[in-house]
Amino acid sequence: MDTTHRSASAATTDPDDDGDTAAAHGPRRIALELRVHGVGGTTPAEMLDDPRVVRVTGDDTAAIYRRAADADAEERPLGPREGDPEEPVREAYVWCNLTSGNGSRALWLILLPFMVANLAHWMRPAAPRGHPAQRIYDVLVRILALTLTVLLAAGACEVALDLIAWQCAGSHACSSDRSWLGFLNTAHDGWWSLPGRRLVVAGALPLFLVGLLWWLSHRTWSAYESASPPPRRPGTSRDTPPSERPTLCLDGFWYGRRVVARLRSAHAAAGLLTIATALLLTAHDADGRAGADAALRWTGYVLAALVAVLAVLSAVIVCRTARSEAEPDVETDRPIVRWLPWASLGALGLTALHTAWARPGWTSSGHLPGAGAFAVIAVLQGVLVVGLLLTAAALQRAAHGTERTAAGGLAGASVALLACALGGVLTGGVAQRAADWLDRGATPGDPHAPMAGPPVLLSWQASVIPVLLIVVLVLVVVAAFQVRAVRRRVLPDVPGLYEDEEKPDAQRARRIAGTIARAGLTDRAPLLIGVITAATFVLGTGAVVGARLTGLPPGRALDSAPVFVDALAETAQALGSWLMGAGVVLLLAMGRRAYKDQSARRTIGILWDVGTFWPRAAHPFAPPCYAERAVPDLTWRMATWTETHDGRLVLSGHSQGSVLAAAAVWQLDPVTRSRVALLTYGSPLERLYGRWFPAFFGPSALTGLHREMDAWRNLWRFTDPIGGPVRLTCEDGAEIDRGPLRDPLVFGRTLQHPLPAQILGHGDYQADPVFDATRAELLAHLAPGVPPQPAGPIAERETGPEVPPAAPQGSVGRSSA
């Protein structure tokens, strides 16, 4: 049942009333509250406080629901409840299945580094649009994202080509009791036992991984990045030039179909070419021996040139693939872009044929030639991160009103480095565990081991993980002491938040103060992440230098050091290797559980709710952007409902739902926006998004949103670890924030609350009486008539009911929390 297309000609007065009553009260437009849930999702019945709900419009992925009693609300003159005509109809937009719907989303866990790298793209400082450093920043992030794809493909090649096909299958001690390696075992002297042919067979594993990433990206691309923009009625298009509009207002912002397709072609080609490069380097090493076939050597040179040309072409496409946001980009890519992955696959096929060619006397020993590529990738990523730091610093100097920007505008570079660290842990952890399994736990670098083991750099990177964990543990201890200090500081002010409390309960007050103190840790996250990032960069640099200077794993490199130092090095190496492998096993276990368990899948979906709000602008293999479906859904619903029923609409968003709501309001045309009010609660718009993504949710963007809205109110609590005030300073002096709200609602036991009230924190804002009063105020702000076009900032009109008094504004400040 779709109420969007119901007739708008229904009567607006009670049929039993006479004409004088209708004339006295005038026509009444129906009111609608459209609720949007936050992270983790919820059911329509919980959102609407009614077990009987019906789907109004949408599908199993995302839909709008109503109470069954409200299904035909537009056709009834007295509204949804007889005797209460001003009660708005409630609708619930449920979007949680976009991130935690079916079991295949558990596969997204392997895409975590790609998601983090994509976030770095959107964290650039809020410099004026057109600043030359912006393009440099975007290009650097896209190149860094490309290195992550290469790193993942190289990690798969390390396990399949080096550890399994080159080292284990080439060693009788390793492969003798492994029947699944029998046809590759050199002792059998079979057709597949030649080194080149073993590598070609093992290359199927990294090829499958690249193909899986391409398939996941293509499958989600057709479902997420292709939502059509909302309808535009004649005469309601924005008259502001695109260059002067907020970025989230642009018509093509949530339509990333072409940019993802271009990046997907380039990244798929890069993954295939990484496999081809590993094969070519090994074959070149064999062809460089004395007496080798010159024809094979020159064939290798030709193939290397072909791979190099395709690799350069992939990098050029990545550098030139900028987002086109003014209008939806529906152009068709050039044939060279569309056929690049297939050309790369053809080059890989030719390389495989070249590598499999018989070469007399060719044997495998030691590490696979080209294992030093991990060091090259690590150094390149470090250079790119430094470039991001410098570029972000230049953008931050050009930005204005950024005193609350996270990490001084350097958050994007920090997050990009963390993405590289996550990629290194995943690839290194898989390689370490595979090596331990194949060589039966022998120490890496041991000359008596049946295998040479993983590259030396991976052992050094594993060794620094315990040190990094010690840094994190110290930060946790410091944060715990800070929480205790803040709790002691705010404890005397807690009873003052409640009137007529003669004998406050000390234990109750400490519990409330502790909740406030822990909620304030969110504001310290930039400092914590900055320290972790700095430690990661220093330790990562040390690992690269140590591996380069010694050429040995840490345990063997420090054999000549004092006994205590040598023991620490061996312990760090063993413990780090175990931790890297345990992290990968834990990730796989979580994915397996999420595949089978809906509740676990919903819990993991919280991570994607936060991390996949932004379009895939840097990495096409990142989990898809659910907002490219959710924002058009909300915009279409608001535009069509207000036009069909000429009613008033309150868009009510909680937590992440408030971010979706704000993004949807930005996409509305001015006439529709004049009929819509915005109610946000538990909202991270300023506290998280404004600080971490200042170019899109910074003070100037949020101030512009307020000027374009007829009404906007924001509810927040001190006890909320996610939501907070929006902190706007507007020309019209309008007060947007309502809070801090009391939490709990009452301190002790009362006649209305005979049992202790729960500390709600981030949830259940609708339980506070301020919520209903604020919603009624917003509905009163929406004028009875609809102006043809808003002329400018609309002054706030105090025509709604008086909001019940909240907590004193000066009792407990956010800065002290």
Image (spheres, rainbow, N blue to C red):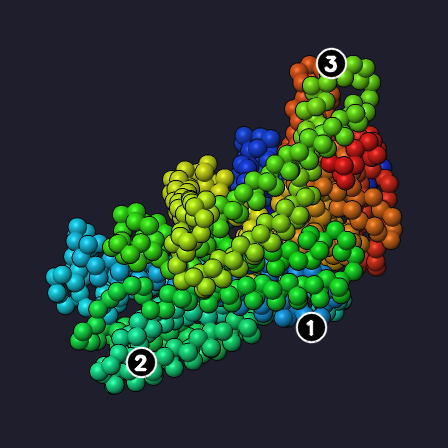
Q: Which of marks 2 and 1 is nearer the N terminus?
A: 1
Say if residue 809 shows up in the picture: yes
Q: Is mark 2 on a helix, strand or loop?
A: helix
Assign the C terminus to one quadrant of the image: top right
Residue that numbered label 1 is attached to: 132
Q: What element carries label 3?
A: loop
Disc 3 residue type? Leu
Circle 2 crowding by C-alpha within 10 Å: few under 14, some 14–19, many from 20: many
Q: Nearer the viewer, mark 2 or mark 1?
A: 2
Measure the alpha-carbon separation of dots 2 and 1: 42 Å
Q: Which of 157 and 600 is in front in this view?
A: 157
Q: Are marks 1 and 3 in contact (CB under 8 Å)?
A: no
- The percent coordinates of residue 763 (x first, y second) are 63, 34
Judge left or right: residue 24 versus residue 647: right
Q: Nearer the viewer, residue 352 or 706?
A: 352
Circle 3 crowding by C-alpha within 10 Å: few under 14, some 14–19, many from 20: few
Circle 1 crowding by C-alpha within 10 Å: few under 14, some 14–19, many from 20: few
Residue, x 60% and y 64% (percent of image)? 386
Q: Nearer the viewer, mark 1 or mark 3?
A: 1
Q: Which mark is residue 751?
A: 3
- The percent coordinates of residue 453 (x first, y second) are 32, 56
Q: Nearer the viewer, residue 702 or 162?
A: 162
Q: Which of marks 1 and 3 is nearer the N terminus?
A: 1
Say if residue 151 shows up in the picture: no
Q: Is residue 728 above or below residue 615?
A: above
Measure the alpha-carbon separation of dots 2 and 3: 87 Å
Q: Earlier in the sequence, mark 2 or mark 3?
A: 2
Disc 1 residue type? Pro
Residue that numbered label 2 is attached to: 300
Q: Do the residues labelled 2 and 1 touch (CB within 8 Å)?
A: no
Q: Is mark 1 on a helix, strand or loop?
A: helix
Measure the alpha-carbon separation of dots 1 and 3: 64 Å
